[in-house]
């Protein structure tokens, strides 16, 4: 019995094929070698049978496959506006321009242009955040999970942080409040029950070792029925009576009231600040609609403590983030401009008629349904939308294989495309993918 696998050509033999020479002229040798290995490995898995399309074509296909960047843009037709798996918030044109400008050369990242001396990266975005939230000071770090870790380390390390059992939440990507608290060096003290926590629960738990009362926004779920919790304003008062700090993990970073568009129940950052929390922590790439970032706003003393904590250095924000965040924040000076220019806000507040226009152009069956805010924000919100439905189970896979990939919703044997999250300039691309021979 002969084993075909023993007869597989060597990588050198494949590279010597005349058909491979043109590939080597167009692509880095390392990529072509990797592709040749992949083709041989595939043949080996196949029992040693050479590729039916021939070695040259197999290597060429592998080069095409291996040469594309893995982090590629996609079209989001799921209707989940803040889709964590699809990169959360798309940026506003002003933010893209700002980060491009800064990426192209040197920047005054830690340089004081007035004095010609070393400056601080923490100066960027600070004044805008103060202006927009009403806080006394602000600090930007890499993401909100890092921001919460930093705030707890700075304000509760070596002491106790008291939190309601109803707020020991898990946010996607294994961010669990108890684990973050443990890593911060604070001792977690749980009070109340899953559904009800009262002011005197916190009161009774306070000791000489208590350093922080922590409030966590239940970003991604709702508690209904027989419930009670303590508002931040009350928690902050209680903390200040005892001379300790109140930290508020607010999550989403909503900077403007969206109740006019039917989106209610999510606290805004200015509300959190006005309630008296010493530190409010939130994300840059959720409802704020900017780049991935963690933002801390609050009192001078609390933010100074955060800035001085060693963890601040380990979770610092990079210059591209700071540039994009600054440009995004500047749009909020004119809320109507923010709503039109920041894609997340534009999609969340778009009218049904306007969404319907795009859904109709997609063809298929026009279906009324719901979009989702996503990203652990407005968990119960119903956003009415228009979908294009196609009775073709294989379509979702075909759309994913498109260039650029299109991510659709699958509901039973139907594939649904939600026009809300398909940008107007992407509609023609989606139509072309839908009408291509499948
Ligand atoms: C999303 C969220 C976080 C984590 O934010 P990242 O920016 O993803 O790190 C933390 N706390 C709450 C309440 C959240 O909603």
Image (cartoon, rainbow, N blue to C red):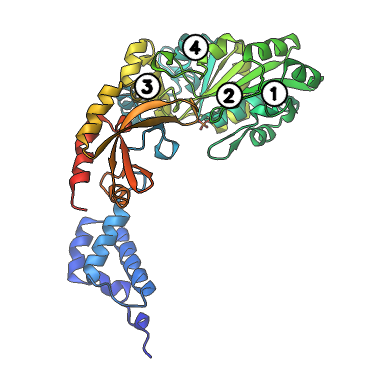
Q: Earlier in the sequence, mark 1 or mark 2?
A: 1
Q: Position of residue 389 (x, y in %)?
A: 29, 40
Q: Nearer the viewer, residue 95 or 350?
A: 350
Sequence-wise, the earlier of marks 4 and 3 is: 4
Q: Which residue is mark 2?
A: 217
The residue depicted at 32 percent of the width and 30 percent of the height is 420
Q: Nearer the viewer, mark 1 or mark 2?
A: 1
Of the residues under marks 3 and 1, which one precedes in the sequence? 1
Residue at image mark 1: 196
Under tag 3, what secondary structure?
Answer: helix
- Can residue 35 be seen by looking at this rendering? yes
**Lower sequence index among marks 4 and 1:** 4
Label 4 sits on residue: 133
Q: Secondary structure at mark 2?
A: loop
How many C-alpha atoms fall within 10 Å of the one at disc 1: few (<14), some, or many (≥20)?
some
Q: Classify 427 as above or below 192.
A: below
Query: Are the two marked residues, 4 and 1, in contact with CB atoms closer than 8 angstroms?
Result: no
Q: Measure the alpha-carbon separation of dots 2 and 3.
A: 21 Å
| 4, above or below 225, in the image | below
User: Could you say which is closer to the camera, residue 211 or residue 220?
Assistant: 220
In the picture shown, does residue 29 fall above or below 296? below
Q: Quadrant of the N terminus?
A: bottom left
Residue 34 picture quarter: bottom left
- Work out whether mark 2 precedes mark 3 in sequence or the reverse, and give the earlier one: 2
Local crowd size for mark 3, using a 10 Å CA cut-off: few (<14), some (14–19), many (≥20) = many
Find out if the beta carbon at label 2 lies less than 8 Å from the nearest ligand 1 atom.
Answer: yes
Q: CA distance from mark 2 to mark 4?
A: 18 Å
Query: Label 1 to label 2, Cα distance in Å?
Result: 15 Å
């Amino acid at each position: 019995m002969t084993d075909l696998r023993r007869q597989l050509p060597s990588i050198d033999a494949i590279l010597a094929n005349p058909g491979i020479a043109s590939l080597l002229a167009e692509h880095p040798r390392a990529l072509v070698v990797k592709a040749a290995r992949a083709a041989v490995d595939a043949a080996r898995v196949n029992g040693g049978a050479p590729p039916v399309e021939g070695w040259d074509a197999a290597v060429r296909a592998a080069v095409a496959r291996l040469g594309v960047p893995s982090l590629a843009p996609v079209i989001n037709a799921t209707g989940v506006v803040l889709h964590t798996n699809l990169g959360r918030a798309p940026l506003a044109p002003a933010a893209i321009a700002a980060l491009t400008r800064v990426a192209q050369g040197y920047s005054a990242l830690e340089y004081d242009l007035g004095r010609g001396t070393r400056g601080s990266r923490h100066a960027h975005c600070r004044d805008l955040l103060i202006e927009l939230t009403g806080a006394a000071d602000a600090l930007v770090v890499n993401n909100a999970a890092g921001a919460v870790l930093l705030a707890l380390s700075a304000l509760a390390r070596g002491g106790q942080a008291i939190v309601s059992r109803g707020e020991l939440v898990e946010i996607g990507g294994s961010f669990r409040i108890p684990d973050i608290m443990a890593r911060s060096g604070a001792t977690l003290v749980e009070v109340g029950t899953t559904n009800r926590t009262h002011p005197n629960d916190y009161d009774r738990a306070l000791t000489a070792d208590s350093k922080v009362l922590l409030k966590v926004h239940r970003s991604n779920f709702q508690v209904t029925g027989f419930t009670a919790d303590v508002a931040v304003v009350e928690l902050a008062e209680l903390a200040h009576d005892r001379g300790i700090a109140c930290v508020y993990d607010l999550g989403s970073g909503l900077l403007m009231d969206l109740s006019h568009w039917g989106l209610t129940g999510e606290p805004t950052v200015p509300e959190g600040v006005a309630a008296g929390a010493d530190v409010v922590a939130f994300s840059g790439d959720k409802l704020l609609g900017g780049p991935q970032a963690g933002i801390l706003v609050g009192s001078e003393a609390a933010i100074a403590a955060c800035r001085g904590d060693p963890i601040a250095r380990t979770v610092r924000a990079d210059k591209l983030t700071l540039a994009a965040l600054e440009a995004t924040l500047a749009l909020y000076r004119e809320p109507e401009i923010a709503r039109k220019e920041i894609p997340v806000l534009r999609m969340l507040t778009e009218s049904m008629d306007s969404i319907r226009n795009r859904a109709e152009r997609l063809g298929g069956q026009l279906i009324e349904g719901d979009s989702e805010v996503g990203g652990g924000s407005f968990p119960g919100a119903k956003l009415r939308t228009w979908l294009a439905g196609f009775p073709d189970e294989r379509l979702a896979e075909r759309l994913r294989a498109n260039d650029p990939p299109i991510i659709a919703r699958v509901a039973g044997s139907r594939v649904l495309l939600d026009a809300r999250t398909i940008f107007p300039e992407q509609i023609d691309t989606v139509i072309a993918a839908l009408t291509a021979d499948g």
